[in-house]
Image (spheres, grey):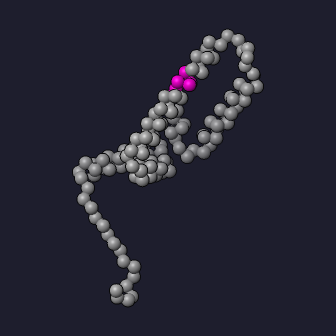
Amino acid sequence: EPEGDGPGLELRLRNVGLAFWTLQNQISMGLDEAEKSMGMNEYDIDSFKQMVGGSSPLKIMLFYSITVLHLVFEYLAFSSDINFWRSKTSFEGLSSSSVTMQACMNIIMFLYVKEQQQTKFVMYF
């Protein structure tokens, strides 16, 4: 190895199929459009790119499956709460302080998420 040469640079190229290249192109255009139309910030876009680019497809499918299950259970719990309060004719057995505390905690959590402004996803729902 000759002296005086700086550090070397190794460049590796590989062929990608048309379908893979088209998928990458579509995802890139979709992320750009989401950034413009939904007001997403760079943090949201980078987080999504890191999640998709650094994970296996199986892990991503598992993550989204769990997310969908969480949304379904959240909906069922919310509808159950609404049915409970609609059918309630008296507040016998309920502590007014516990109901007030729960309402205060929900307000505090909402205000905290609104103040952070790191992601718009939470604010849409």
Q: For residue 18: magenta?
A: no
What's the residue at 33%, 72% (across, down)? 10
Magenta segment boundaries in residue numbering: 75-79
Count of numbered marks: 0
Q: x, y percentage for residue 12?
A: 30, 67
What's the residue at 72%, 29% (across, down)? 101
Magenta segment, principal secondary structure?
helix
What's the residue at 24%, 53% (across, down)? 17
Q: In this rendering, does residue 45 appear at all?
A: no
Out of 32 and 92, give the one closest to the viewer: 92
Left or right: residue 25 versus residue 74 is left
Left or right: residue 83 versus residue 15 is right
On the rendered image, what quadrant is the N terminus found in? Answer: bottom left
**Going by the picture, which residue comes out furthest to the bottom?**
3
Left or right: residue 39 versus residue 77 is left
Quadrant hosting residue 80 = top right
What's the residue at 39%, 82% (across, down)? 6
Out of 103 and 16, give the one closest to the viewer: 16
